[in-house]
Amino acid sequence: MADNPVTPPPPPNHSGHSDDDNYVERRSLRDYYIILRERIWIALPLALLVSVSIGYYQARETPMYQSTATMQFEKPETIVTTQGVVDSSVRSDIDLNTYLQLLTSNRLRTKVVESLTPDEIKILQRPYLQDLQPGASLPPPSALVGSVDINSIRNSFLISITARHRDPEGAALIAQRYVDQFLNYLLDNVSGSNDLAVEFLRERAEQLRKESEAKAQKLQDYMQQHNLISLDSSMSIVDDRLRTISGALTSSRLKRIDIESLSKQIEDFKRQGLNLLEISFIATHGTVPSLKNQLATLNQEQSRLAERYFERHPKMVDVANAIAVTEEQLNRAIDLAIADLATGFAEAKKNEQHLQEEYNQSEKKALELRGLRVDFESLKSDADVAKSNYMQILDRLNQTSTTKYMEKIPVRPLDRSQVPGSPYTPNIPRIIRTCVGIGFLVFFGVAIGLNYIDDRIKSAWDVENFIGVNLLGIIPDLSDIKDDDKYTLLMNDSQAPGSEAFLSVYSSVKIHSKLDFPKSILVTSTIPGEGKTLISCNLAGSFARHGRKALLIDCDLRRPMLHRHFKQQNTTGLMTWYEAGGSVDTNLESDPTLGIINIGENLSLLCSGGRSKSPTELLESPQFGNLLEKLKRQYDLVVVDSPPLGAVTDSLLIAERTDEVIYVCRFNRAYRKHIRLYIKALRNSKNEILGVVLNGLTPRRIEYYSNYRYYRSYKKYYGAQS
């Protein structure tokens, strides 16, 4: 069976029935590849339509040209006086932002419009002549300037002026005209300075220097007198230490109080005879949790064994001894927790006393330093004010120049605007990149989105990861095989492609089944037409082929079909047996009311015996349950073909009387949420769900999923070995 291309290995533990696997399965790249492959003819045309539409719309935009001129601000030498000196240089971001606002102002835009000559206006109007309607007038000069962006280049004194226009020469003309008009504005508004400021600043600077030195010397003498290096640093160190010790002292005190409270609680529990394990500290200390869980497990095991054995049975004695040992270990662990608590209390109390002593010392030191702070701060404030005044005058003096005249403007043109050779929009390469990116996003988004919207069962991942049960096997599409042959593939030892698939289901059923023979298996599905009857027939044939005496029962009493597939009459069966009294005291194999038919080696058939619109009376009757139990004693395996769960509730009634359940799902037919709901209902009925058989896949899809399964089988097997 190892050569079967669709044999599934044991799945990961999604169903909660096994602890062999503890990893969580996620979609692999191959799963997403299959999703994209199946929806390529939906997602690809839609992606092409969206990307081509966006590209066509963007490519039809009106061509626009842009040109950029650059200016550089400098820091010219200036003369500062006390009589209204005008300083036009850029000394901070505020100055630079002021000039930026001026460049974007309506005043400068108006000056640019007024400076345009008639020939320049004609250049700006050229692009509008092509679209001009008969009788319409051209735009006025104020509307021809277009959009202009003024930006400062970060971490520099450079300003770029970018103009956009439908004509390339017009864009260059407007950008350069903005630079020219801005320079003219500065020439008109900047005035000169005078030389009297220099002498005044020098005299004032000398006075402030002497005053600053005297007050600094007075502060230095005070610090030497009291052995102070830096009062602020000393105060900061002491304050930080006080805060640190205070926080540690508070934490230590709270810890001691908590331990005292916990110790009192333990004493109260001991005095009142309460269970110490109800105290969180003891319940979570050391080995107590594991010993507690171990004791609970042993008690459960003792209760379970008590239902089967007497008190002196060896297994009962072993469990009792294990409980005694565990209880003794648990008591010792509780005593150890109490001892650890006492040790922690002593340490917390000692630490609290130590921290209190340190806090008192630091507090005393802080009080001594604060006593000196008033005089020190007064002297330091006088020295700082004198020094600040001196440095301000000195800074203004350093900014001055002995030159009589200063440059009137602190800016010069850096790069003139150039006529662009091509429009910046529409940008065909950028449009292509955008369209390709959008196309990929739409393609993947539509394909994967449809997968999440489409809730129908499609893959092994849907079965094991979403529904949470084992995948027993994948059955190919058998539409090419005649109906008379596909239901007897295993009986006739056929070499058809589907035979190996059914043998793989047989192997998976044996692997996942926890029950020994004899037993009964219910085969059901969600909706009609998913192939549960096909699976039932060939599953029973597989066990019969391997030497097991199997019985196939048609419990679809509303629409029986098994007798047709095996070319038998449906005159006797379950309904005729029930109407005749439903006795199980006879030899059921030869009971004429049942009419069990031998249809092959080791394989028999029990028909429905007619149709019924309300078969629940039979299915709920005690005779039906007794019949299944009696048949299990006469056959190794009883395979029950039932109605679909999504149509009627008959299968749930039958499931209560069978040992195991196989769920059949047809590819792309039933919805995952419905299947999971019915699986949950079967589990609530205490049924053992062997797994799901995925039916009706094309050979191409089986190839995808089989490779995927082999990869997971390799990972699981060798991963477990390592």
Image (spheres, rainbow, N blue to C red):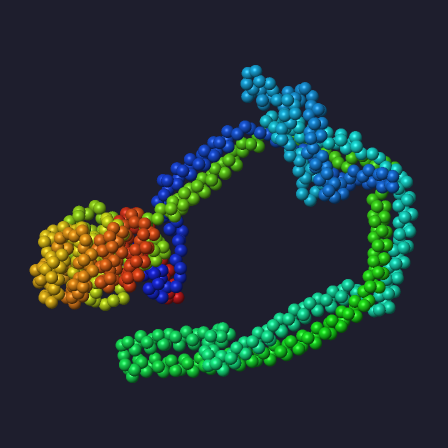
Residue most toward the front?
Answer: 272
Quarter containing the C terminus:
bottom left
Q: Nearer the viewer, residue 258 or 369?
A: 258
Quarter containing the N terminus:
bottom left
- In the figure, 547 relative to 118: above or below? below
Q: Residue at x 74, y 35 (%)?
A: 412
Q: Nearer the viewer, residue 57 or 672?
A: 672
Spot occupied by residue 234 in the image (x, y as percentages of width and height): 76, 66
Q: Residue at x 14, y 58 (%)?
A: 574
- In the figure, 175 relative to 360: above or below? above
Q: Nearer the viewer, residue 89 or 664?
A: 664
Q: Residue at x 76, y 31 (%)?
A: 185
Q: Residue at x 60, y 26 (%)?
A: 167
Res. 473 visible in picture: no
Spot occupied by residue 669 in the image (x, y as percentages of width and height): 29, 48
Query: In the shown orientation, is residue 639 left or right of residue 466?
Result: left
Spot occupied by residue 659 in the image (x, y as percentages of width and height): 24, 64
Q: Quadrant of residue 413?
A: top right
Q: Quadrant of residue 2?
A: bottom left
Q: Quadrant of residue 634?
A: bottom left
Query: In the shown orientation, is residue 357 left or right of residue 323?
Result: right
Spot occupied by residue 663 in the image (x, y as percentages of width and height): 27, 56
Query: In the shown orientation, is residue 272 left or right of residue 411?
Result: left
User: How many numbered marks does the figure carry?
Assistant: 0
Q: Nearer the viewer, residue 260 or 493?
A: 260
Query: In the shown orientation, is residue 604 left or right of residue 416?
Result: left
